[in-house]
Amino acid sequence: MDQKKKKSYLINTAAIALLYLLFFVLIQTKTINNYFVGIMIMTCIMIIMALSLNIVAGFLGQMALGHAGFMAIGAYSSAMATKAIVDAGIEMPSILLLLVALLVGGLVAGIFGILIGTPTLRLRGDYLGIVTIGFAEIIRIFFINFGPTGGAAGLKGISKLVDFNNVFFITVIVAVLIFTFGRSKHGRAIISIREDEIASESAGVPTTIYKVLGFTMAAFFAGLGGALYAHYQAFLEPSKFAFMFSIEMFVIVVLGGLGSLTGSILSAIVLTVLPEMLREFSEYRLLIYSLLLIIMMIFRPQGMLGRSEFSLTDFIDKLIMRKNRKTTSDGGEK
Amino acid sequence: MSVMQAKDITMQFGGLTAVDKFNLTLEPHELVGLIGPNGAGKTTIFNMLTGVYVPTIGTIEIEGQSIIGKKPNEIVKMGASRTFQNIRLFKDLTAIENVKIAYHNFIDYNLAQGMFRTKKFWSEEKKAQDECFKLLEIFDMGEYADTLAKNLPYGQQRKLEIARALATEPKVLMLDEPAAGMNPNETAELMKTIHFIREKFDITVLLIEHDMKLVMGICERIIVVDYGKTIAEGSPAEIKNNPDVIRAYLGD
Amino acid sequence: MNLFLQQLINGLNVGSIYALIAIGYTMVYGIIKLINFAHGEIMMFGAYFAFIAATSYNMPVWAIFLTSMIIMAILGVAIEFIAYRPLRNAPRLSALITAIGVSIFLQNLALLIFKADPKVMPKLFPEKIFYLGGIEISSTTLITVGLAIVFMILLDLYIRKTKQGRAMRAVSEDKDAAILMGINVNRTISLTFALGSALGALGGVLYSVAYIQVFPTMGVMPGLKAFIAAVLGGIGIVPGAMLGGFIIGMVETMTKAYISTTWADAIVFAILIIVLLFKPTGILGKNTREKV
């Protein structure tokens, strides 16, 4: 690890700590109310969903329109797991229970990622898109008809384990892991498939394995997001995981910039908070939202950040450089 | 033992025979040219040798092991890598990333080590960075390491593609019209580089060209194909005076 | 046996509507490679205009259909012009997001104008039931299937026999070559949207007559199913959309009758997935290999 990397780690860690401190103070002093804390928690979950979808859509370059399906699997499986633990009367600290939930949600969704990805990733473009929609719908219809998870009426009585404190740090960890994944040899191999699949194979990359890996990683983190959702809402119903929800996540990723993780984060924040802000316009809310979406795409089709990442270190460097230039030019005047 | 051997490979698309009973034996350290007029089937031969197409009939072996039915990436691992006629780089990645992707199989850390950035990750990434940078420098491309492939000048893109193919540490390097679109100076320089890398890496080079002059200069042996068939094979001097070759190129 | 024949007729009824809507998806996809997510909403608005024409203006039936189809053709062209044309050279996914945006917009516009409560669609056709060896066929079913088939034949003739139809095929085959041949690509694309939207509107009116209801989100599910039908048949291929539409309609009706109503949609999707796994570009799709 060189000097520059160390510096950038330090800056980012400090920034995250500061951000957390800020929210912590705001929440403790009741400057922001519970309703808004709820929005922040949902935003964190949507960030995880968008980041994980970006692995398939941005890194691998495949149209995946069924992300809500993996989220549903993660949500329901983790909820069943924690319910079983609680019902069995096993005592464990809530953070440990949450960890179990995350692990179960992520792993079960990841397994489904392998099962679904292996046969379908031969399909290309829009055909893959429609097949992912299909799987997500089948999953949703399964939960509507499946008695043990409450069917269409929903699953009640899930332990509420998620609060802003833990969801904030889980989101940070997930973001960092997906980031490092993208910058590892595995991430590079996946990105090379997006760039040119034939060239990638000719460069010795086992493309099939990496496609499934990318798909599975995305499913894993989506399942983890689902587990968070389940243990925040404490209630699940199949209708939440409908087709439009998958589309919503996809919109977030494209709007942020395919392949840009910081773009996904930014976009998830904007697109989760914005509709809430527009709530006072109630019936015009989605009209405005959709118009903004259309206008945004017409004027910035590559998304907010395109494929580039926002780097706090570079940003600070630039700020300092500008200041330096200013001081030297000031000095010159004297 | 020969490095690569193809016996009677034939490729049919529907009713059309693009390549008809083509034979090829590459000895270690050879520099062989595959020439022929446009549409003669040269690229189809390449595609069969690298696993992009599976020949309708025939066998292909790399150091005695059959590659029929193997995927392109498996064939790369066995020791044959290639470039493309119409450059296929990873356009939105930097030059060095392009090479690192091809170096993929020599970077040794697993998923978790990569995501949690263990010591192993850093040391292996450093090794990859150094090795790939060295490769770029062989092509005088060190200064372009962090330039996006799509922003490189055309000649550099061609060279980057060769560097990428070399990063897989091949025994046979197959170049599909590497000089296409280059000016005479660039071409001359490229030919020198090809000669150089053959010596430096001690590899076999198979070169497609349709510009005869160019191949004559550097290849020891030349195979001429037309309408999917080998019409002549021999040293540049022999090929130059072969009446069939002259007919194929100039018409009757 | 009678029940089976009865279901066959029902399947044909639903299938012909899906086929009409699927044609719009497939035509647009064929020409600009865009999944026009707003097509389901075109269908919905088509139904609303027919509802207004029938209840407020008391138009004759043929005029109701014509008005709805013409208005939707214009709207379709307008949507392409405003929302899709500026993105023609942008990444395809951006255009897709725009289409999703248009879909959400139209749905909420309908919600604002017509409110959420379903309107009852008046019976547009004289109610008569024919008995054919124990099976019942209503006049509505007959007219629905008949109209759908007539329009599909007309469309097929139009695409194959007329100059504009040839231009459409040329543009979807190779846009750049079409420009060089002097074809006005913009006009051809507009025409494609007009035809696709008109047929979508026809499908919408027939759908609302069959289910006696009009409401703002009515386009979502039939839209999705018609899209599946288009993909199943091989997207971009008009006869494929028709075939796909009938297959989806048939499968849906049969599973509802014989297997389960709640699982019907899941089975439809499962069939689509299985077909695509064996035939990755749909039933009538051609496998194109990327040139190396």
Image (cartoon, coloured by chain):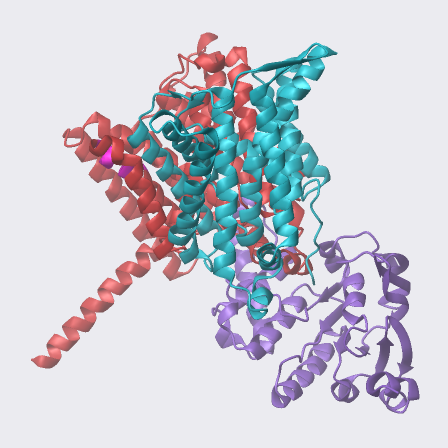
Asked if residue A311 is among those painted magenta in the image, a careful observer would answer no
Q: Residue at x 37, y 27 (%)?
A: C58
User: Which chain, by letter, is cyan?
Assistant: C
Query: Magenta stretch?
Result: A272-279
| Relative depth, front residue between A228 and C117 | C117
Query: What tint does the image give chain B?
Result: purple
User: Which chain, by letter, is red?
Assistant: A
Our reading of the magenta stretch's main secondary structure is helix
Residue A306 seen in the figure: yes
Residue A71: percent from the left, percent from the top?
48, 30
| Relative depth, front residue between C248 and A317 | C248
Residue A110: percent from the left, percent from the top?
56, 33
Residue B225: percent from the left, percent from the top?
85, 76
* Residue A267 position by quadrant: top left
- Residue B132 lies left or right of residue A269; in this view the side is right
Q: How many labels, in total?
A: 0
